[in-house]
Amino acid sequence: MHIPGLKRCRERALLTQADLAERSGLSEVTINRLERGRNEARISTVRKLAAALDVAPSELLEQVQGCLLYTSDAADE
């Protein structure tokens, strides 16, 4: 899944990609690729990033969440 709010949340926390990598346990290359939309993230990665940034996972997925809710089976009921 894409993480459209990652860069915004990282910059708001005044962290570099290296800082976020250290806090989250992910590599700096992974952070960079996720911010540029070159890698897809697992939910476990989203949770690690959210914890490292002290935000709810939904903040990182802000734009994607609306699409997922719109296209879910629950919306058809």
Image (cartoon, rainbow, N blue to C red):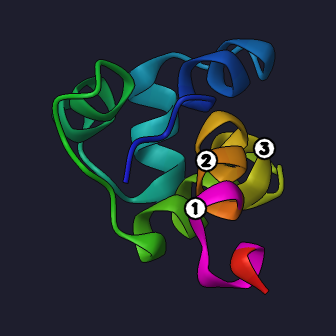
Residue 16: percent from left, percent from top: 51, 16
Horizontal side, residue 51 vs residue 25: left or right: right
> Magenta stretch: residue 54 in it?
no
Q: 45 or 68, which is in the foreground?
A: 68
Quarter the N terminus occupies = bottom left
Rendered residue at 38%/24% (across/down)? 35
Instruction: Say whether residue 62 is visible.
Output: yes
Apparent side of residue 40 relative to residue 49 in the rendered image (left or right): left
Mark 2, residue position: 67
- Frontmost of labels 3 and 2 is 2
Q: Locate residue 46, reporting x and y percent.
A: 52, 60
Residue at 16% from the left image edge and 29% from the top image edge:
38
Residue 6: image quadrant is: top right
Identify the magenta region: 70-75
Q: Element under label 1?
A: helix
Q: Which residue is mark 1?
A: 71
Q: Are marks 1 and 3 in contact (CB under 8 Å)?
A: no
The earlier-in-sequence mark between 3 and 2 is 3
Residue type for callout 1? Thr
Residue at the disc numbered 3: 59
